[in-house]
Amino acid sequence: MQTQSEASGLNIHQSPRWPHILMFLFTLIIAGSFPVVASITTGIDSVLLTFWRFLAATLIFGAMLPFAKNGNGIPGWRDMGRYAMVGGSYGLFFVLMFQSLKTTTPLNTSTIYTTLPLFTMLLGTVVGEPFRIRQLWVLALSMVATLWVIFRGDARLMLGLTFNHGDLLFFLGTLCLAVYMLSMKKLQRKESKIHFTFYSLLFATLVMMVTAIYRTGSLAVPGADTWLGIAYLAGPSTAVTFWILQYTATRLSPTRIVAYTFLTPSAVAGLEWGLGLSSPELSVLPGIGLTLAAVWLLQLDSISGNSETP
């Protein structure tokens, strides 16, 4: 019979709640990156900033690589193909996002971003993920609730939205992000998380390096006043979230994971209120409430099927 002390010594990572706790942390970290980016992007190209962010994150995992299990060998071509798919699709999302913002607005891209869970679910059916009508209905509710928060409950602003060429690019970028989400689950093997993260981030960094050189003609080093912000973006916002997605990808279905992306606008609004950057708006509270309810519903076995814990 197992004693209480033995039970308390069980690995906390075996708890079915742990992936969900990490995804809430993921949402808060991503939400925190928005004010950081806004504070340091003046005077520096966004692609160049993202390159340095990815490079720093890659170096973090590179430093840990010698201490990782199965982390010292050079991957073969087939493994490199897996890492290129994960890191390349992630890097390409950023490239298309920055290119789209030349001709569209952050409001449009935020609206299009709500289609990520739907894209992920539809692409998932192609690679063997189950398709459930109940999930589709809850995803629709989630999109409506998230749009409510994005547009601050202003129906006139929502109805006045128009799309252009830049929005098409961001649709493609969102599709790349859906590929990234699915590949995080489908392409992991028996290598360590550190090993997988390092090589995937390496390819994402290469994509951003090529794009930055093409766009700016060089890899100019940012000023000293931006490195504190880059440290946050490279550490928690890139390295930690990348690892969280790898960890949860083998324990939750892609639809359950991307459902948490619906919480990002609500988390950003909450952080802005907490930091005094904006005043609380009662008009967005119904949207936040519906978003929380929809994300909760998508985690239920009755909606999304049995949990995929190992």
Image (spheres, helix red, strand yellow):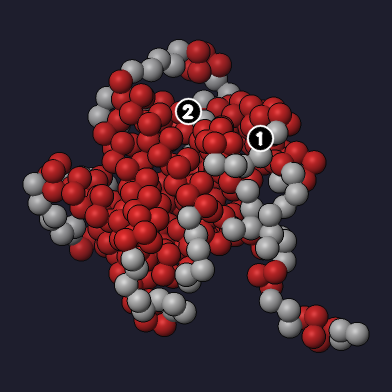
Question: In the displayed structure, does residue 190 sit left or right of residue 19?
Answer: left
Of residues 228 and 291, which is closer to you in this image? 291
| Residue depicted at x 25% and y 45% | 46
Q: Secondary structure at mark 1?
A: loop
Residue 111: numbered disc: 2
As displayed, is residue 296 above or below residue 74?
above
As displayed, is residue 145 above or below residue 273?
above
Of residues 58 and 272, which is closer to you in this image? 58
x, y percentage for residue 128?
Answer: 60, 42
| Picture quarter with the N terminus | bottom right
Q: Secondary structure at mark 2?
A: helix
Tell me if mark 1 has few (under 14), some (14-19) or many (20+) residues whose alpha carbon lies within 10 angstroms of its own. some
x, y percentage for residue 44?
Answer: 20, 48
| Residue depicted at x 32% and y 61% | 77
Tell me if mark 2 has few (under 14), some (14-19) or many (20+) residues whose alpha carbon lies within 10 angstroms of its own. some
x, y percentage for residue 168?
Answer: 36, 24
Please, what is the three-letter code of the amino acid marked with disc 2? Answer: Thr
As displayed, is residue 158 above or below residue 78?
above
Residue 260: numbered disc: none
Of residues 217 and 221, which is closer to you in this image? 217
Among all residues in the image, which is located at the extreme right? 1
Question: In the displayed structure, does residue 271 sit left or right of residue 62?
Answer: right
Q: CA distance from mark 1 to mark 2?
A: 24 Å
Give the residue pinned by disc 1: 131
